[in-house]
Image (spheres, rainbow, N blue to C red):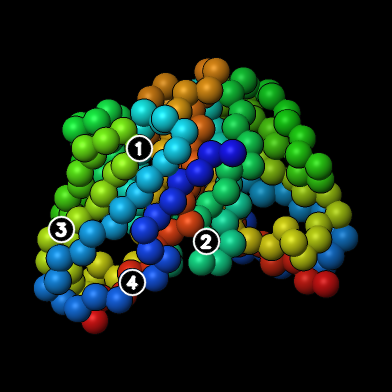
Amino acid sequence: TQLLEQSPQFLSIQEGENLTVYCNSSSVFSSLQWYRQEPGEGPVLLVTVVTGGEVKKLKRLTFQFGDARKDSSLHITAAQPGDTGLYLCAGSNYGQNFVFGPGTRLSVLP
Amino acid sequence: DVKVTQSSRYLVKRTGEKVFLECVQDMDHENMFWYRQDPGLGLRLIYFSYDVKMKEKGDIPEGYSVSREKKERFSLILESASTNQTSMYLCASSYRKGRGYEQYFGPGTRLTVT
C-alpha cells in the first residue's frame, strides 16, 4: 500500500514569514500533485511535478519533486492571509488512481 | 478551465433514505472519482470509473454504489443512508497530461444524515 505523509500537520505563522511543508513516501510516484483546499470547498490543483529534481514556481510558491520521486516540498515566500488553507499532496503512479496525504493546515495571521 | 460540478452543495437526508449525488465534468476526461473527506481521516476513495459503464471499488465502497452511463456524468448512490455516512463528498475527474495525471475536483456536497 502506498502512503503519503505530510508535515507539519498544523502551521500557524505571521503574514510575511516564509514556510516549507513536506510530503514524504517510501514509494516512488510517476507524478505528484499539490492542492489547496479552503473550508467547505473542493481541493484546487496548484501544480503537477513529474521529473525527479523538478522545481516549479507559482508566484510566491515553489514546489520541488525529490530526485528519487518519493518526496516533495512546497515553499511559500512572504506568506499572506490568502494562503490560509489545507495543503494536500497526492501521488499518482502511471495510472488513474491517486494517493493523498493527510494535509497540512496552514493559518497565516495578519 | 476545467469544470466539475456537483448537484448540491448541502444536503440533509433521513436515515434509510436513498440518496443520489450527481457529478458532471465538461472536459471529456476519461476518469472520474468519488471521495469522502472526514476530519482526521483525510480523503478516502469510494469508487472510481475509467470509462463509461466501468467502475472500480476504492478503499471504502461499502454502503455505496455508482453509475456512469455517460462519459461526463458519474453518480454516487447511497442505497440506505446511515448517520455514519454524514460527510463531505467530493467528485473529481482526471486525465493524462504528459507523463503525469492531473485531477480536478468539484466544490463538494456536504451531506448530513439525521
Label 1, label 3: how far apart the Cα atoms are: 24 Å
B7 versus A46 height, above or below: below
Residue for badge 1: B72
Residue A54: percent from the left, percent from the top? Answer: 69, 24
Q: Are marks 4 and 2 on the same chain?
A: no
Residue B35: percent from the left, percent from the top? Answer: 35, 51
Farthest residue to the top: give it: B98
SS type, badge 4? strand
In depth, the one of A34 and A82 nearer the eye is A82
In depth, the one of B1 and B39 nearer the eye is B1
Residue A62: percent from the left, percent from the top? Answer: 75, 39
**Quarter-of-image position of residue B81:** bottom left
In depth, the one of A80 and A7 nearer the eye is A80
Label 4 is placed on what type of residue? Leu
Q: Nearer the viewer, mark 1 or mark 3?
A: 1
Compared across the picture, whether B69 is left or right of A80 comes to: left
Residue for badge 3: B63
Residue density around tag 3, few if under 14, some if 14–19, many if 20 or more, within 10 Å = few
Label 4, label 2: how far apart the Cα atoms are: 15 Å
Q: Mark 1 near mark 2, Cβ–Cβ under 8 Å?
A: no
Q: Which mark is residue A41?
A: 2
Please name the residue shown 73% across and 49% down the image.
Answer: A20
* Chain designation of label 4: B
Label 2, label 3: how far apart the Cα atoms are: 24 Å
B105 versus A110 height, above or below: above
Farthest residue to the bottom: give it: B114
SS type, badge 1? loop
**Residue B70 showing in the rendered view:** yes
Q: Nearer the viewer, mark 1 or mark 2?
A: 1
Q: Which mark is residue B11?
A: 4
- The N terminus of chain A, quarter of image: top left
**Quarter-of-image position of residue A49:** top right
